[in-house]
Amino acid sequence: MCTDFLIQAADGTWVNGRSMEFGTDLHTQVYIRAPNVTDVLQGLDDETMELTPTYGFVGTSSFRTSICTDGLNTAGLSTGALWLPGSQYQEPKLFHSSKNVLCGFFVNWMLAHCASTDDVRHALENDEIRVIGDKWLDKVSPLHFPVHDANGNSIVIEFLEGKAVISDNPVAVLTNRPTFPWQLDNLRNYVNLSPWDTDSIMLGDLKAENTGHGTGLAGLPGNATPPSRFVRTTYLKQFALQAKTAADAQSQAFHLLNAVDIPLGTVRTKTTPSILNPEGVEYDYTQWAVVKDITNRIFNIRMYSSPLAWSIDLKNLDFSALNGQQIPVPQEQVALPLLK
């Protein structure tokens, strides 16, 4: 389960926030890929794919492989992979294997080759690439993909019945199941919500007053399900005062992510006990969150064990020296000393 959104500051800065919820530790690290260098990406179950990026990018890896689940490139394209059960990928091109993109590497491919949502749309609509399943991810990781660019454009890509379905994203929010059009339609059930406190009302001779601030949001769903997180993020994003600067927008994005944060243990699923999981319980929780300043090419990440965020400025990054490296994110320090 994940949540993704896009906001804009008054100074024009576009900022993308995204949380990663998963039941298995992804062992996420920061992954760096340089432009114009051909590499062979290594996935799970010996799956590989050759990639020569046009753009350098920074992202989040999984299981210390080349599988990138989220990222930002030097052209200002931001994208990630979110869980969508029921996804069915495209059939491969039989005689043009170089046009086949493994689903697990689709985020890598977009970050490597696309500068805008139009670039992504053109590649899929003109059959320049096909996103296909692989031996492992096709079975256990059905995915859909939010894509944002430096001009504030936002689309959603879903693979349904073997076809790429591309939707404009008018609210710039995405979570998980059901599919994106259903999530948009569901927003109509909450048009009564308001950032304004409700007024008192006379009930006979009784003056009934509200119980405190926030009564305009009474009925806002607060559970961890994808529909609830979609509604909650869309309306809170809509009602929040617009941030003034890029720094303000990054801070606001983290606050919006706090509203969908899942503490470890609050969401549980019974599974078959195994050597790796003798308890037979899977805990879905927020493993990390990223806030990406698309306009200024800044990638921020914080991990579950620490509220501190760590930042990478893509404009000043030595991609050549760091190509292919995976950088652990510090998690030991919860706070910085105010006085020394």
Image (tube, helix red, strand yellow):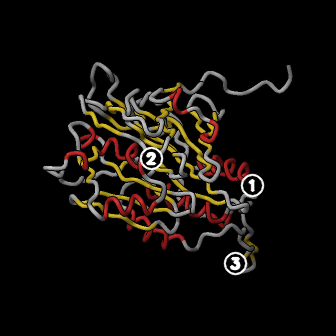
Q: Nearer the viewer, residue 28 or 110?
A: 110
Q: CA distance from mark 3 to mark 1?
A: 46 Å
Q: Residue 176: give x, y in percent of width and height.
A: 40, 53
Check the image and name the residue furthest to the front. Answer: 36
Residue under numbered circle 2: 111
Q: Considering the numbered disc 1 on the image, is that residue within a helix, a strand or a loop?
A: loop
Q: With respect to residue 323, does 216 lie above or below?
A: below
How packed is label 1: few (under 14 Cα within 10 Å), some, or many (20 or more)? some
How packed is label 3: few (under 14 Cα within 10 Å), some, or many (20 or more)? few
Looking at numbered disc 2 in the image, what kind of residue is underneath it? Answer: Leu
- The numbered dot on residue 245 is 1
* 284 on left or right of 125: right
Check the image and name the residue furthest to the right. Answer: 339
- Mark nearest the camera among 3 and 1 is 1
- Mark nearest the camera among 1 and 2 is 2
Q: Considering the numbered disc 3 on the image, is that residue within a helix, a strand or a loop?
A: strand
Residue at figure coordinates x 36%, y 32% from the top left: 39
* 265 on left or right of 38: right
Residue at figure coordinates x 68%, y 64% from the top left: 215
Residue under numbered circle 3: 203
Looking at numbered disc 1 in the image, what kind of residue is underneath it? Answer: Thr
Q: CA distance from mark 1 to mark 2?
A: 26 Å
- The numbered dot on residue 233 is none
Q: Earlier in the sequence, mark 3 or mark 1?
A: 3
Q: Nearer the viewer, residue 137 or 237?
A: 137
Q: Earlier in the sequence, mark 3 or mark 2?
A: 2
